[in-house]
Amino acid sequence: MKKVLVTGGAGYKGTVLVPKMLQAGYEVVVYDLMLFGNFLRKHPKLTVVEADLRDTAKYAESVKGCDAVIHMGCISNDPSFELDSGLSKSMNYDCFEPLVIASKQAGVKRFINISSSSVYGVSDAPDVTEEHPLLPLTEYNKYKGLCEPLLWKHQSKDFVCVTIRPATVCGYSPRMRFDLTVNILTNHAYHKGVITVFGGTQKRPNIHIEDVTDLYIELLKYPAEKIAGETFNAGYENFTVAQLADFAKKIVEDEFPDKKPIGITTTPSDDNRSYHVSSKKILDKLGWKPKRSIEDAVRDLCRAFKAGKFPTNTMTDQTYFNVKTVKSIGLK
């Protein structure tokens, strides 16, 4: 695998992933609509294509000569009451199989599909494995789940397909998001001195952004027989939202003693997703496990605040919040 196309490569994870890939010697084609700008530095082995996932002809042209695809591009975190469901369906589902077909026709050897552990919705199971029924609660979760069986239709010896269901990602990225649980809690602790917990009892798996991007690169290297046709959960430890708030409080107080004491308030939430994800399969089959903790992610964000890496107000600037940005643009 020498040349890789990354959809959504200019996004929150992509902006961390792509520089790692370039440093590792890969030639990278980033295919992204650039709704949030482009924070990727120019590089002789980097090609950036600003285009819509629904433009299959443009995608087919861009994927020529690529050995692998890492498919992350989507409209993410889109509660059905927040965004037009037609947009979610067209961007996250309708164009998916055409992209897979175009990739296969272009001679791509490996297609890495990034799904989400949120496809499990709500579960009381002590450990939610990859065999657990999918019970999505939002349009985003629903269409991520529906894409998975479409991919398996095209799995073959010469077109190796694998699906990853990562936990909620957290930590610092140059294209930052403050609409993800750990990042939200840390942002509130730093700026407001009070953390607002929505609900609190929901169990949420998380994973450090550095770990999950390392995993995506590793998936380019594993022998085909280990990953072909497989689905893997990928997460760190499972905590409740209330526990995550405690982590944020303690670490922000440690990094910024002048902000003590940071309070925690609890308010009802309409986001009832709760599940305890098992990442045992990926450890047993691939020997992969995260190296960084949720506390590490909070500390990384604190250091980013200290270093002045956020030029605008992270509480009010809509570019840090996916749904707000998409709504303001009026994407159709």
Image (cartoon, grey):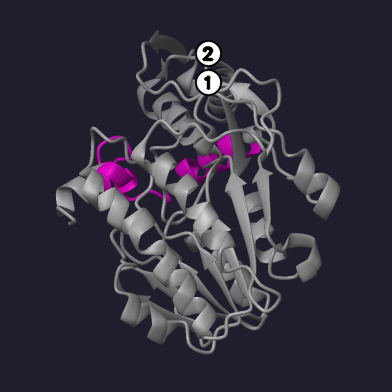
Return the x and y of residue 103 as percentages of the image width and height. Answer: 50, 77
Q: Is residue 305 magenta?
A: yes
Query: Are the residues flagged by discs 1 and 2 in contact, CB closer than 8 Å?
Result: yes
Return the x and y of residue 244 as percentages of the image width and height. Answer: 56, 23
Q: Pointer 1: residues within 10 angstroms few (<14), some, or many (20+)?
A: many
Tell me which segment is drawn in magenta.
296-323
- Rendered residue at 66%/30% (across/down): 128
Residue holding disc 1: 241
Q: Who is closer to the viewer here, 150 or 217?
A: 150
Instruction: Residue 93: name its quadrant.
Output: bottom left
Quarter that holds the C terminus: bottom left
Q: Amino acid at mark 2?
A: Thr
Residue 243 appears in the figure: yes
Residue 40 appears in the figure: no
Mark 1–mark 2 distance (CA, rounded to whole Å): 6 Å
Return the x and y of residue 178 as percentages of the image width and height. Answer: 39, 39
- Tag 2, which secondary structure? loop
Q: Amino acid at mark 1?
A: Val
Return the residue found at the far front.
153
Q: Is residue 321 above or below residue 48?
A: above
Q: Pointer 2: residues within 10 angstroms few (<14), some, or many (20+)?
A: some
- Residue 271 lies left or right of residue 88; in this view the side is right
Return the x and y of residue 263 as percentages of the image width and height. Answer: 45, 11
Quarter that holds the N terminus: bottom right
Residue holding disc 2: 201
Q: Is residue 47 magenta?
A: no
